Every structure is written in C-alpha cells, then in structure tokens.
Image: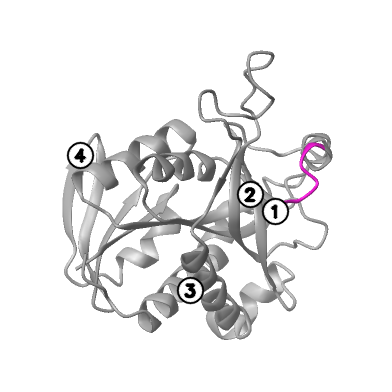
C-alpha cells in the first residue's frame, strides 16, 4: 500500500490529525517523533517538521528515506500576499520558491544553485484533489469552525486560491516586508517558512508534493495578533476537515 506523509511545522497544526489516527505508533528519528498508522484506510506517517527550511528539509528527507513515503502533503498556516487572499482563506500551492535565496552574481536571484531553477512545481493531480477537498470544506466553514470562531476572526465566505507560495527563513510581519515581496513576486499568493524546501527535497526524490496553507494573517504589522488562537480555532480544524475529506474520497493504492 502506498504511504502518505503529512507534515506540519507546529504541534497545534498536527494535533487534530493525530487524534484521528486510531492505531498510531510513535517512531523517533533525528530528534523527531513520526506517527505511523492509518486513516480512512490509507497508510500514513504524520510528523511535526519544526519551523524553517532546514528543519523541514531534514524532516522530509527522513520521511522519504526511512519511511518510504510515496507522496507528501504539508499543511499549516501562512501569511496572505495576494490582493484577494484574506484571513481564513486557504491557498493550495501550484509552485514554491525561496524568496530569500540569492547567490547572485554567480546565479540569478532566487535560483537554487546548480538546479537551473528557482521555482519548484507541486504535483498537479494531488494539488487539484486538495483544492477540491478545500472547496467542499470552506463552503460549510461555519459548520466546521462554529459561529464563535467565525465571528472572532471576522471570517466571511472564505475562499480557496491556487498559486505561487513563497518560503523564507524569517517571519514576515511588517507591511514594508510584505509589500517588497509583492513587488518581487506579483503572482505570490502567500508566504511561509518551509514549503519550498520540502518541494526541493521531493523534486530530488521524484516524489509528488502538495502544500495546503490556511491564511492566518496578511503578513503585515498585525501578523502576530492572536496567532496561536487562530491555529487552534481555525487552521487545525480546516486541516483536519480537508485532509479527512481528501482521504475519504481517495482510494488507497498499491505502492
């Protein structure tokens, strides 16, 4: 049976998923706890990657090498950059780039040295499936989150977006920073700290990768406000519902 890897950067993003793996077994590798089990009939390995590109790349490599994961999904939060991307929306990445990679003048800005590319595509079929599952969940957001959470974070008719996601080793939390990123990457939907590194590892191994991000803030001067509360009340519930819907509609396949 094919094995699916699920990664999140923070414990709060992963806790709801782990609660729905009835037969999970903990395996510790490289200082990380990998939870091996099943969900909706699929073989699954879930893990907390920790924050940042290096930590995420280490975790992804262990998933692929030690656990033989056949496809990998990263789920978590991000700051919104696209003009129409609002708090409470979901972004499914179509490609990822490290916005802080710059080996110029030896290589073009943002190009990963010796790869001949700056952008790493996500897997199209997998991303489409996750986008469809996200649409189904967000159409009934109040049912999954409750009226109190919808009101607390002023969520109204949340939407699903697909597009470019930026990654870098800093938490973007000022309007000046986010505006600079929009100028450099006009097509960017969101910014976070792990996805492009995981995409590069999956590219190296030839393993399908997809990234699912709930927008927790607008990557501006208010980005720190109620961050942990948002993850618990909104992002973790989205992740649980979307992944559950996706796995429930996807037939397990032989490896």
Mark 4–mark 2 Cα distance, whole angstroms, equals 29 Å
Dot 1: within a 10 Å radius of its alpha carbon, few (fewer than 14), some, or many (20 or more) residues? many
Which span is picked out in magenta? 184-189
Q: Is label 3 or label 2 in front?
A: 2
Mark 3–mark 1 Cα distance, whole angstroms, equals 20 Å
Observer-nearest of 225 and 192: 192
Please tell me whether residue 187 belongs to the stretch shown in magenta: yes
Eyeballing the image, is 244 above or below 143?
Answer: above
Mark 4–mark 1 Cα distance, whole angstroms, equals 33 Å
| Marks 2,1: beta carbons within 8 A | no
Residue that badge 2 annotates: 165
Observer-nearest of 3 and 175: 3
| Marks 4,2: beta carbons within 8 A | no
Dot 3: within a 10 Å radius of its alpha carbon, few (fewer than 14), some, or many (20 or more) residues? many
Mark 2–mark 1 Cα distance, whole angstroms, equals 14 Å
Q: Position of residue 227 (x, y in %)?
A: 61, 52
Residue at x 67% of width, y 75% of height = 150
Observer-nearest of 152 and 173: 173
Residue that badge 4 annotates: 29
Residue that badge 1 annotates: 217
Q: Is label 4 or label 2 in front?
A: 2
Which badge, 4 or 1, is on the more N-terminal residue?
A: 4
Dot 2: within a 10 Å radius of its alpha carbon, few (fewer than 14), some, or many (20 or more) residues? many
Residue at x 61% of width, y 40% of height = 97
Q: Position of residue 166 (x, y in %)?
A: 64, 43
Eyeballing the image, is 105 above or below 192?
Answer: above
Residue at x 76% of width, y 50% of height = 187
Residue that badge 3 annotates: 242
């Amino acid at each position: 049976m094919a094995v699916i890897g699920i990664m999140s950067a923070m414990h709060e993003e992963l806790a709801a998923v782990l609660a729905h793996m009835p037969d999970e077994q903990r395996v510790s590798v490289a200082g990380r706890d990998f939870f091996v089990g099943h969900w909706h009939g699929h073989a699954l390995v879930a893990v907390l990657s920790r924050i940042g590109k290096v930590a995420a790349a280490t975790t992804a490599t262990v998933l692929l090498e030690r656990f033989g994961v056949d496809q990998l999904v990263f789920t978590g939060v991000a700051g919104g950059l696209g003009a129409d991307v609002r708090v409470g929306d979901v972004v499914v990445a179509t490609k990822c780039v490290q916005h802080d990679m710059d080996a110029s003048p030896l290589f073009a800005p943002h190009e990963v040295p010796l790869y001949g590319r700056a952008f790493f595509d996500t897997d199209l079929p997998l991303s489409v499936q996750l986008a469809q599952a996200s649409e189904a969940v967000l159409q009934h957001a109040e049912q999954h989150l409750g009226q109190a959470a919808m009101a607390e974070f002023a969520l109204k008719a949340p939407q699903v977006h697909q597009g470019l996601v930026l990654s870098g080793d800093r938490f973007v939390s000022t309007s000046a920073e986010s505006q600079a990123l929009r100028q450099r990457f006009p097509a960017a939907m969101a910014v976070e700290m792990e996805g492009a590194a995981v995409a590069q590892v999956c590219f190296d191994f030839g393993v399908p990768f997809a990234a699912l991000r709930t927008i927790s803030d607008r990557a501006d001067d208010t980005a720190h406000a109620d961050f942990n509360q948002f993850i618990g009340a909104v992002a973790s519930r989205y992740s649980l519902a979307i992944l559950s819907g996706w796995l429930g509609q996807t037939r397990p396949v032989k490896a």
